[in-house]
C-alpha cells in the first residue's frame, strides 16, 4: 500500500492505524507526491482560518472511500488523533470491520483510563470519553477499567523504594493496540 502524506507527517500513528485493518501490508511512504496505482491512502491536512481540515482518501482492491474532519486551528495537540480517527472511520467503511480497541494504538491503553481517573472521572465518564475519542468497545473498556482499578494500589511508590518494569517481549498473540 502506498501511503501519501500532504501537509503532515504523522507516519507512526497512521501506519499503526492502517495495520489494524491490513496487518501484513508493506508500505511505501510518499510526501507531497501522488502515486494512485494499486492500493493507496492519501492523508491531507489543510490549515484554514478557523479550522484545520483533514482529508483521507483510500483505495483497497479498487474500492474507494473518502472522509473529512476538522478541528480547531489552534488545537495542534489534537491534529494527530483527529487524522487517525478520520483514517479509522474510512478503513471501517472500506473493510466492513471495526476493531475492538478502536483506533487506540500503543502499548498501554490502561494509561488513558488512569489519566481520566486522575482527572476525577468515574467509570461512566471514562467509558464515554474513550468510546467517543477512540471508538473502543465496551468489552475492551471494561478490561482496561478492571486492570486500572486492580493495579491502582501498586502505582503509588512509598518513599525510599523503587519501581521496576518488566517487559515480556514475546507474547503468544499481538493485541491490536500493540506497537511491538
Image: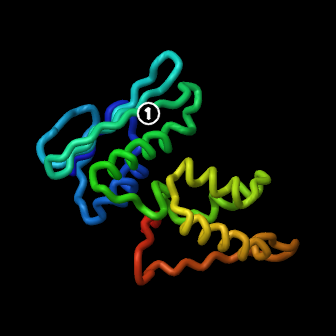
Secondary structure of the residue carrying numbered label 1: strand
Q: Residue at x 39, y 56 (%)?
A: 16
Q: How is the image coloured?
A: rainbow
Depth check: 164 or 3 in front?
Answer: 3
Q: Residue at x 19, y 34 (%)?
A: 34
Q: Is residue 36 left or right of residue 95?
A: left
> In the rendering, at what x and y percent does residue 137 appear?
52, 62
Q: Is residue 160 left or right of residue 35?
A: right
> In the rendering, at what x and y percent does residue 65 appear?
26, 41
* Quadrant of residue 147 within the rendered picture: bottom right
Q: Residue at x 63, y 57 (%)?
A: 127
Give the position of the C terminus as an image quadrant: bottom left
Q: Is residue 109 above or below residue 72?
A: below
User: How many numbered marks appear?
Assistant: 1
Depth check: 9 or 25 in front?
Answer: 25
Q: Residue at x 59, y 64 (%)?
A: 141
> In the rendering, at what x and y percent does residue 152 appear?
76, 71
Q: Dot 1: few (<14), some (14–19), or many (≥20) neighbours within 10 Å?
A: some
Q: Which residue lies under the disc numbered 1?
A: 69
Residue farthest to the left? 37
Q: Is residue 41 left or right of residue 17?
A: left
Residue farthest to the top? 49
Depth check: 135 or 153 in front?
Answer: 135
Q: Is residue 29 above or below residue 137?
A: above
Depth check: 3 or 164 in front?
Answer: 3
> In the rendering, at what x and y percent does residue 87 appear?
37, 45
Residue farthest to the right? 159
Amino acid at each position: 500500500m502506498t501511503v501519501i502524506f500532504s501537509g503532515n507527517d504523522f507516519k507512526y500513528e497512521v501506519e499503526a492505524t492502517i495495520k489494524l485493518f491490513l496487518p501484513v501490508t508493506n508500505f511505501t511512504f510518499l510526501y507531497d507526491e501522488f502515486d494512485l496505482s494499486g492500493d493507496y491512502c492519501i492523508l491531507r491536512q489543510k490549515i484554514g482560518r478557523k479550522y484545520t481540515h483533514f482529508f483521507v482518501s483510500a483505495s483497497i482492491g479498487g474500492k474507494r472511500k473518502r472522509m473529512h474532519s476538522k478541528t480547531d486551528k489552534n488545537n495542534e495537540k489534537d491534529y494527530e488523533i483527529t487524522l487517525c480517527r478520520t483514517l479509522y472511520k474510512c478503513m471501517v467503511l472500506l473493510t466492513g470491520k471495526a476493531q475492538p480497541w478502536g483506533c487506540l494504538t500503543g502499548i498501554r491503553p490502561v494509561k488513558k483510563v488512569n489519566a481520566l481517573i486522575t482527572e476525577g472521572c468515574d467509570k461512566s465518564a471514562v467509558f464515554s470519553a474513550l468510546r467517543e475519542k477512540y471508538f473502543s468497545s465496551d468489552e475492551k473498556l471494561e478490561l482496561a477499567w478492571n486492570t486500572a482499578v486492580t493495579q491502582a494500589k501498586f502505582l503509588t511508590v512509598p518513599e525510599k523504594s523503587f519501581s521496576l518494569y518488566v517487559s515480556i517481549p514475546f507474547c503468544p498473540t499481538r493485541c491490536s493496540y500493540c506497537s511491538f
